[in-house]
Image: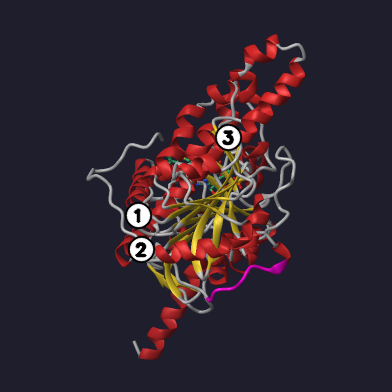
């Protein structure tokens, strides 16, 4: 065969496979408002940067008529490319081919690209659009998912792992993402569940729509399974590219620095904290007032909103920010906010991202609901995560730092390198009202005018403890600072911490309160 004929054959074979499930299936995908797997990869990666591997891999199914079926590329596209000029490994499941279901060959394509990611030390991006384990391949498809989960776990803390959910994803197609660092969803397109509505109807006799079972909003607001929510696939890809700008390739690197920029002047730090300590404010305003260009990339914005987490830059370098949100439940720590913060802290620690903690909370949320939901176990995660973290840790106490909340929010006692307090800080075992009611109970009860006595005792307690100076006099706080100088202090201390080295006792691994 001549060179030209071979080339013709090559293009013919390539094109045949690249149409995936065929024109009709692709039209169906488009009718659902979904891009094809190939369009997704090309839209996410830098232009013309994608190199595909294993296009010619054939599926391994033999039963239920599968041996007669041609499943192009076995329903998954794998390869490498670049984002913002830096290399990534990527796979995208193709729902037009057997619903993107995962058989053995499909799984082997994914595990090969995962192995490359781990060996080369570059991020892994998985675009999931799959009904999970391919039913016709039985235990072989389960084996495939097991091998993916194993590698997700090996890769955890070594390379960033990003999952995108772009279709109805069931079983392994959601458990692999759950093992990764960030999960992106798109309104009306993404669905996540361990089993779909059909199975629920069969097993439980209940009817539920896919959207109500595990739509993008549910995963972003209720379950906390998703970290980023977008309206469209293109918006989602922009979010992924933005995330990549803040994080390093792997755990031996630091995130790329960017040119430093001052915060926007409209976010001046003064007047953010209301005069009345019981009044809320948006902690994001404090963040905007101290980070470069007032640019904050929030993670899990819609779930456990009583804590705010996300990435920003200070003087050009990435920081991970954890801040109590007085706007929601007064910024308390509860089951979900503890989980949310703890996981983020561990990501930052694994990937050399310094932690900035902004404190304003009345403590852990009391009550039967929280106790029954396991607030002791979940709340312990944040204590563990901060204590374990050896990246630079800088804490600023803005207002309330009461009780366990004071300790948990990266206090000096959990290993913070630098702790600053604004003059508005109140550091005490509990708020003045509650404290006076307990420790002056008898005096208040026996007074001729109990209300006046309570007022006096609250004032006495406030004077003594609701300030930063007692903590400062014990050296628990390094400086009480003028809020306007917060950024200056942060730049200075982060600069000082650039070469920080801190070790921990040798161990195989710790046992966090999962
Ligand atoms: C084989 C599958 C499949 C699967 C979908 N398809 N899921 N084929 N194995 N798991 C095929 C369908 O037969 C159909 O093929 C095509 O994909 C599109 O599926 P539809 O059902 O028509 O699409 P839709 O109505 O959008 O529903 C999507 C769905 C549903 C919600 C994903 O298909 C579904 O419930 N699938 C099963 C989900 C599930 O329970 N998976 C097993 C998980 S267990 P045709 O030829 O008609 O186009 C698992 C093990 C890991 O993953 C465990 C982790 C711990």
Q: Nearer the viewer, mark 1 or mark 3?
A: 3
Q: Considering only vertical position in the picture, is 354 above or below 315? A: above
Q: Nearer the viewer, mark 2 or mark 3?
A: 3
Q: Main secondary structure of the magenta part?
A: loop
Please provide percent x and percent y for residue 48: 51, 79
Question: Which residue is pictured at 52% across the width and 61% down the height?
Answer: 489
Q: Is residue 260 magenta?
A: yes
Q: Is residue 220 left or right of residue 252?
A: right
Q: Considering only vertical position in the picture, is 202 above or below 75? A: above
Which quadrant does the N terminus fall into?
Answer: bottom left
Q: Does residue 464 show up?
A: yes
Beta carbon at label 1 within 8 Å of ligand 1: no
**Circle 3 is placed at which residue position?**
465
Please report whichever mark, 1 or 2, sits nearer to the chain's N-terminal start.
2
Please report whichever mark, 1 or 3, sits nearer to the chain's N-terminal start.
1
Please provide percent x and percent y for residue 475: 44, 45
Q: Where, by quadrant of the figure, is residue 334 drawn?
A: top right
Distance between mark 1 and mark 3 Cα atoms: 47 Å
How many residues crowd mark 2 within 10 Å: few (<14), some (14–19), many (20+)?
many
Q: Is residue 21 magenta?
A: no
Q: Which mark is residue 117?
A: 2
Q: Mark 2 falls on what kind of element?
A: helix
Please provide percent x and percent y for residue 257: 47, 72
How many residues crowd mark 1 within 10 Å: few (<14), some (14–19), many (20+)?
many
Distance between mark 1 and mark 2 Cα atoms: 8 Å
Residues under numbered marks 1 and 3 in contact, where contact means CB atoms less than 8 Å apart: no
Residues under numbered marks 1 and 2 in contact, where contact means CB atoms less than 8 Å apart: yes
Please report whichever mark, 2 or 3, sits nearer to the chain's N-terminal start.
2
């Amino acid at each position: 065969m001549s060179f030209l004929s071979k080339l013709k054959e090559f293009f013919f074979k390539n094109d045949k496979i690249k149409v995936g499930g065929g024109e009709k299936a692709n039209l169906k995908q488009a009718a659902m408002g979904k891009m094809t797997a190939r369009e997704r990869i090309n839209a996410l990666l830098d232009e013309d940067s994608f190199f595909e591997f294993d296009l010619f891999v054939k599926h391994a199914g033999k039963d239920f008529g599968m041996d007669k079926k041609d499943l192009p590329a076995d329903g998954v596209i794998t390869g490498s490319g670049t984002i913002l000029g830096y290399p990534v490994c990527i796979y995208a499941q193709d729902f037009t081919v057997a619903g993107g279901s995962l058989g053995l060959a499909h799984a082997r394509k994914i595990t090969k690209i995962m192995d490359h990611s781990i060996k080369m030390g570059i991020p892994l991006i998985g675009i999931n659009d799959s009904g999970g384990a391919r039913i016709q391949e039985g235990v072989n498809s389960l084996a495939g998912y097991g091998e993916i989960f194993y590698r997700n776990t090996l890769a955890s803390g070594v390379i960033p792992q990003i999952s995108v959910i772009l279709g109805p994803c069931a079983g392994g197609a959601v458990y692999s993402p759950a093992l990764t660092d960030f999960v992106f969803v798109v309104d009306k397109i993404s669905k996540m569940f361990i089993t779909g509505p059909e199975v629920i109807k069969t097993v439980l006799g209940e009817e539920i729509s896919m959207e109500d079972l595990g739509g993008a909003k549910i995963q972003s607001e209720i379950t906390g399974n998703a970290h980023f929510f977008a309206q469209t696939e293109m918006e989602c890809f922009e979010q992924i590219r933005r995330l990549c700008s803040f994080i390093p390739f792997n755990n031996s690197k630091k995130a790329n620095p960017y040119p430093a920029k001052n915060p926007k002047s409209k976010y001046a730090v003064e007047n953010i904290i209301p005069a009345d300590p019981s009044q809320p404010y948006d902690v994001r305003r404090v963040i905007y007032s101290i980070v470069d260009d007032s640019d904050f990339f929030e993670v899990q914005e819609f779930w456990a909103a009583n804590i705010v987490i996300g990435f920003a830059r200070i003087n050009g370098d990435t920081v991970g920010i954890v801040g109590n949100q007085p706007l929601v439940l007064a910024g308390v720590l509860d089951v979900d906010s503890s989980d949310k913060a703890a996981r983020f802290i561990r990501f930052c620690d694994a990937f050399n991202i310094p932690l900035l903690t902004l404190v304003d909370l009345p403590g852990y949320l009391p009550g039967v609901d929280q106790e029954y939901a396991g607030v002791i176990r979940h709340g312990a995660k944040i204590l563990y995560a901060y204590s374990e973290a050896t990246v630079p840790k800088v804490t600023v106490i803005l207002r309330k730092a009461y009780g366990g909340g004071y300790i948990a929010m990266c206090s000096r006692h959990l290993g913070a390198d630098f702790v600053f307090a604004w003059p508005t800080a109140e550091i005490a075992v509990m708020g003045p009202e509650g404290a006076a009611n307990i420790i002056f109970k008898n005096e208040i009860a026996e007074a001729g005018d109990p209300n006046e006595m309570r007022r006096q005792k609250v004032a006495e307690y406030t004077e003594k403890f609701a300030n930063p100076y007692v903590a400062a006099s014990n050296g628990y706080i390094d400086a009480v600072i003028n809020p306007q100088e917060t950024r200056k202090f942060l730049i200075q201390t982060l600069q000082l911490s650039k070469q920080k080295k801190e070790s921990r006792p040798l161990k195989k691994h710790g046992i966090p309160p999962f």
